[in-house]
Image (tube, helix red, strand yellow):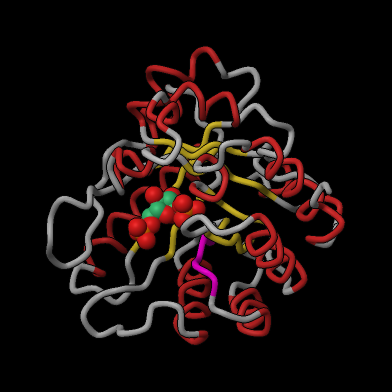
Amino acid sequence: MRSLSETPLVRDGKSIILAHDHGLEHGPTAFSEVPERLDPETVFEMATHDAVTGFAVQKGLAETYYPSYEDDVNLLAKLNGTSSLWMGEPYSPQTCSVEYALELGADAVGYTVYPGTNREPEMFEEFRTVQEQARKQDVPVAMWSYPRGQALKEHRKPDVISYATRIALELGADIAKVKYPRSGEAMATAVDAAGDVNVVLSGGSKTSDYEFLSLVETAMNAGASGLAVGRNVWQRDNPERILDALEAVVFDGATADEALPE
Ligand code: FBP
């Protein structure tokens, strides 16, 4: 089995995954701030930036657009997803098989689990199948580990996020993508709980350049292996500027101040 560091998703032990599954998860209103982003091609273009080690999309976008980008972009095929149109216990059904993701040219696969929901047992079982198929094919697995559900009032509590990274380790993921647990100290605990699993920070809703880069700087200092970010990149008018800065913070160890051009 290849180690994660031997895959194109990781450079010097770190990753910047550009996430663009929001058309399914949040709907097209996610793109309204910069209307040209409704065209997925504009985000595929961003994924060719040197900073980006992986591009996470659902299979529909991969089928249509990836053939033109396969030489320049590492595809992380998202294998499940859900819309925000329904109400109910959080659940994310499988939308693509590992086999089909590989046919599309995927370098890695991604899967969301919602630990803590009433449907956790189903989701763990479905993740099991995906993880074992991915292992057989030697393709890395990123878990979007997002605890939620009726019993969880506070999704970002330090203990909840370190439980989320630990679940990724226990269930055999290579990367755990988690929400920020509100402090560097809590992030460091979550990284420790993950063992050898690379922990990447989820970007969250758009904030200022400085606020976002400072958050990434804190997470990196806490031992994170990078980030998987969507809105904080492609909701900007000038995504190249933030990708340049993220590259400096994640791969070169720059501070937010150093990375931001005057
Ligand atoms: P952002 O960086 O925009 O927060 O994206 C990260 C992500 O995990 C996406 O891959 C996904 O579409 C979205 O967040 C889901 O977030 P939520 O379930 O909280 O709506």
Task: Give the image quadrant in which the ligand numbered 1 is located.
Answer: bottom left
Q: Nearer the viewer, residue 72 or 193?
A: 72
Residue extending farthest front = 262
**Range of magenta residues:** 176-180
Identify whether 78 is placed above or below 38: below
Q: Say left or right for 87 vs 196.
A: left
Q: Position of residue 162 (x, y in %)?
A: 53, 79
Q: Position of residue 21 (x, y in %)?
A: 39, 41
* Residue 131 visible in the snapshot: no
Q: Say left or right for 253 vs 64.
A: right
Residue extending farthest top = 68
Give the main secondary structure, helix, strand or loop, of the magenta stretch. strand
* Residue 233 visible in the snapshot: yes
Q: Is residue 178 magenta?
A: yes
Labels in figure, total? 0
Q: In which image quadrant can residue 71 be found? A: top right
Residue depicted at 44% across the width and 30% down the height: 37
Identify whether 194 is placed above or below 17: below
Q: In which image quadrant can residue 244 be found? A: top right
Q: Is residue 191 magenta?
A: no
Identify whether 110 is placed above or below 35: below
Residue depicted at 36% across the width and 72% down the height: 147
Q: Position of residue 196 (x, y in %)?
A: 66, 66
Q: Position of residue 42 (x, y in %)?
A: 51, 24
Residue depicted at 30% across the width and 48% down the height: 26
Q: Nearer the viewer, residue 86 or 195?
A: 86
